């Protein structure tokens, strides 16, 4: 189980939010602006622990954006979460690609 309460994650979370300008990247995909308060693992940390700390695997989202990507009760990715995962190439920083963020 990934530790979302430790200092290492808190520092990484803040780093990712800063990278994304504290803006929800899911809202941005739809041409909207919304403040981000959560960092989502595109490839879930429990299934892909080797990607858990990689910047390319982390995306800033609002609570609503997070709910669009992940079923909050089961922890499973939604259809949109799976689509985002399929568009995210492991090891490739999507923030530096022309299609930023990776569109659903």
Image: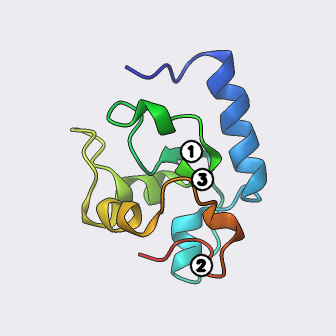
Total numbered labels: 3
Query: In this figure, which residue is indicated by the disc labeled 1?
Result: 39
Count residues near mark 3 (Cα–Cα under 10 Å), then give few for <14, some for 14-19, many for 20+: many
- Seen from the viewer's position, the closer of residues 62 and 87 is 87
For marks 2 and 3, the one nearer the N-term is 2
Tell which circle, 1 or 2, labels the residue nearer the N-terminal end: 2
Quick check: marks 3 and 1 in contact, CB under 8 Å? no
Q: Residue at x 33, y 68 (%)?
A: 83
Q: CA distance from mark 1 to mark 2?
A: 18 Å
Dot 1, crowdedness within 10 Å: few (<14), some or many (≥20)? Answer: many
For the point 59% across and 53% down, the residue is: 56
Helix, strand, or loop for circle 2? loop
Residue positioned most to the top: 6
Say left or right for 82 vs 41. left
Residue 102 position (above or below residue 70): below
Where does residue 46 sit, x and y in percent of width and height? 35, 30
* SS type, badge 3: helix
Q: Which residue in the protein does label 3 denote?
A: 56
Q: Which mark is residue 71?
A: none
Residue 3 percent location from the top left of the image:
49, 19
The answer to whether mark 2 and mark 3 are in CB contact below 8 A is: no
Q: Quadrant of residue 8?
A: top right
Q: Earlier in the sequence, mark 3 or mark 1?
A: 1
Residue 25: image location, x then y, percent: 58, 65
Q: Name the residue that disc number 2 marks.
A: 32
Pair 3/1: label in front: 3
Which residue occupies 62% across, 26% down? Answer: 9
Gap between marks 3 and 1 measured at Cα: 12 Å
Quarter in which the C terminus is drawn = bottom left
Mark 2 Cα-neighbour bin, 10 Å: few <14, some 14–19, many ≥20 = few
* Quarter of the image that includes the N terminus: top left
Q: Is residue 75 left or right of residue 66?
A: left
């Amino acid at each position: 189980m990934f530790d979302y309460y430790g200092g290492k994650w808190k520092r990484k979370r803040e780093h990712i939010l800063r990278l994304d300008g504290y803006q929800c990247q899911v809202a941005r995909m739809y041409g909207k602006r919304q403040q981000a308060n959560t960092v989502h693992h595109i490839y879930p940390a429990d299934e892909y622990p080797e990607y858990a700390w990689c910047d390319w695997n982390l995306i800033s989202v609002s609570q609503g954006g997070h709910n669009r990507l992940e079923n909050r009760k089961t922890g499973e990715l939604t259809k949109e979460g799976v689509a985002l995962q399929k568009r995210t190439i492991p090891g490739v920083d999507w923030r530096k690609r022309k299609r930023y963020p990776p569109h659903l």
